[in-house]
Amino acid sequence: MKPRTQRTIGFVAFAAFVVFIAVLPSFISDFKARDYSYVAIYLIALLGLNILTGYTGQISLGHGAFMAIGGYTTAILMAGNEQFGGPISGGMKDLWTLPIAGLVAGLVGLAFGFPALRLSGLYLALATFAIAVAMPSTVKRFEEFSGGGTGIQLFGTPELTGSIANVQVLGRSLTPNDWMYYLAWSIALVAFAVAWLILRGRTGRAFRAVRDSETAAVSSGVSLARYKTLAFGISAAYAGVAGGLFAIVSAFVNPDTFPVALSIFLLVGIVVGGLGGLSGLVFGAVFIAFLPLWAQGQDLGSLLPDRIVEETKKPGGPAIVYGVVLILLMFVLPNGVGGLFRRAGQLLSRRRYSPPK
Amino acid sequence: MVLAAFSDFMQQVVSGLASGGIYALLALALVIIHRSTGVINFAQGEMATLSTYIAWALIAHHGWRYAPAFVATLLISFVGGIAIHRVVIRPVERGSVLRIVIVTIGLLVAINGFVIWEWSGEPQQLQSPFGTDTYSIGGVVIAAHDIGTIAVALGIVLLLWVLFRFTKVGLALRAVAVNPEEARLVGVRVSWMLALGWGLAALLGAVAGMLTAPTVGLDPNMMAAVLIYSFAAAVLGGIDSPIGAVVGGLLIGVLLNLLSYLSQYDMFDWFTEELRLPMALLVILAVLLVRPQGIFGKPAVKRV
């Protein structure tokens, strides 16, 4: 298969995916649409994390913290924090806070990227993990800024579009859930296209060079400091936008909105999606959003024997299923779903070998 | 007045040493696994919690006395650690670091779920083997449990040192950590040594968990914070250095308690209990930036 054919297939698949996303709400219940908007949010965060971990080879176990920064930026810009004694009066419309959420998280990411230059592999994983762990209690500590443990309520505020009433878009009336769905997916698709544009050119090549061999990259004139910090900044900005959207869709934030587990599951998501590819990430996002529900026996309950379903309904049961599935997945799909795709692509593109007669 | 302040201070130091001893044990477990397999075991805390629940179940549900329950728990944990390595870790050992990290995270989630599923999330009480007495030494009030914890931690460290330094198995364990290929060539059964490392780590975790539960209460997430402090301890001491893990653990324990103590003075009044975890994070970050190999570690030299 020639590269041009491959690209055409890619475009067709992307277009088909866009159409699928556009019509999906007509086939699912209104309530489910909101679940699927979380898939879009996770996809945005995974796209960012994949730039850092999949393409540049830097493990981060702290991306939930960058999501928290984005989420709180959005919430504070919308609702303000004067009610807790903070300096910001808020009043910004929800959509306009997202670029700022991305920017703030991106700047923090850049700032963290500098010290992270000295770390690699598991040390970086540990350092970023520590950030994720420290984030909830730090947020609680600076109560006048963040509202402490109670968090910030956005539901019903005039700044939140589609909080209660239907939303008019292009002459159509969308229910609040459908509105959130289309909002999240539009941003996710733009984020997907932007990631593709960043990664296909010079910058993407530099990222991959850093991942494959730092020594070789430096000897070919790639500045490690520049590209590693850049990767950190971009991926944190993605996480910030995702966090802002998370605050909008759930209509509130508190320290437990972005727990340590979120950071862990984001890493799980890109490994399941297959590192270093874009299309597999959709599966990673679905995995993060739905496995916790499936593990509780929702949707899939009818496929399993009743006895097992009963057992998994007990508290703790879903977590056992989740953990075991995760381990089994690493056994059978070491390169994630994306790896499966690539393998299939290789099989298709391999020239037919005809033995000499 | 000054004397009262001093005895307060000493009290904090002693209880800091006690919690530091627990961090040291768990940090040692992390170091043992990291030295031999190059992996950071994120499930270490949950493994310790599971062991502690086993001890509690033996005592509370089956009427065992503390001592036999303690020994049985250590044995079960040791065998369980070996089993975890053989069944779950060995199949992915040759893959990328990320894959092993995800597997240990899967273990963390599954074990945490199992504990809640089997014994519910209700907090439970595990007695201290040292009772609830307190002693007063020159005005400094010290809990028997704290002294016992320090003694047990130091005793275990000493036993481990003897094992690593003076036995054939210890020599093999060290050989595997330094150079697995050459160890295999001279007849060391590398894979079993790695499994043994996991067994030892699980055993250390069991002791740490049983010493933690009497003070903070037994619940499914009791080791989560302890694990972070132990990460900080291991990084501070040097993640490949057993001595470093012990010293790092004691330092972290005392540091955090001193900050709590000092927060009554104006200069440190910014410190609140919520900042304990972020302080551990600061320690990790500061060490990694200033001296990534830790206090006792050797700088990593990479051949290009």
Image: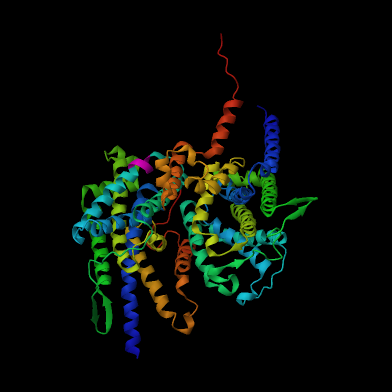
Kindly report the secondary structure that dominates the magenta region of the rendered protein.
helix
- Image location (x, y in percent) of residue A104: 65, 62
Number of numbered markers: 0
- In the image, residue B215 sits, relative to residue B181, either above or below, namely below
- Image location (x, y in percent) of residue B43: 39, 52
Task: State the residue lying farthest toward the bottom.
Answer: B1
Q: Residue at x 34, y 44 (%)?
A: B85
Task: State the residue lying farthest toward the right.
Answer: A171
Identify the magenta region. B86-90
Asked if the magenta segment contains residue B115, the reply would be: no
Residue A214 in view: no
Q: Quadrant of residue B148?
A: bottom left
- Image location (x, y in percent) of residue A99: 70, 59
Residue B80 in view: yes
Q: Nearer the viewer, residue A56 or B116?
A: B116
Q: Nearer the viewer, residue A217 or A159?
A: A159
Which image quarter holds the N terminus of chain B? bottom left
Locate residue A316 relative to residue A5 in the image: left or right: left
Q: Quadrant of residue A341?
A: top right
Locate residue B211 relative to residue A117 in the image: left or right: left
Specify how the rendered protein is coloured.
rainbow
Locate residue B21 relative to residue A286 in the image: left or right: left
Task: State the residue lying farthest toward the top.
Answer: A357
Q: Quadrant of residue B22?
A: bottom left
Locate residue B87 relative to residue A279 in the image: left or right: left
- Image location (x, y in percent) of residue B72: 22, 53
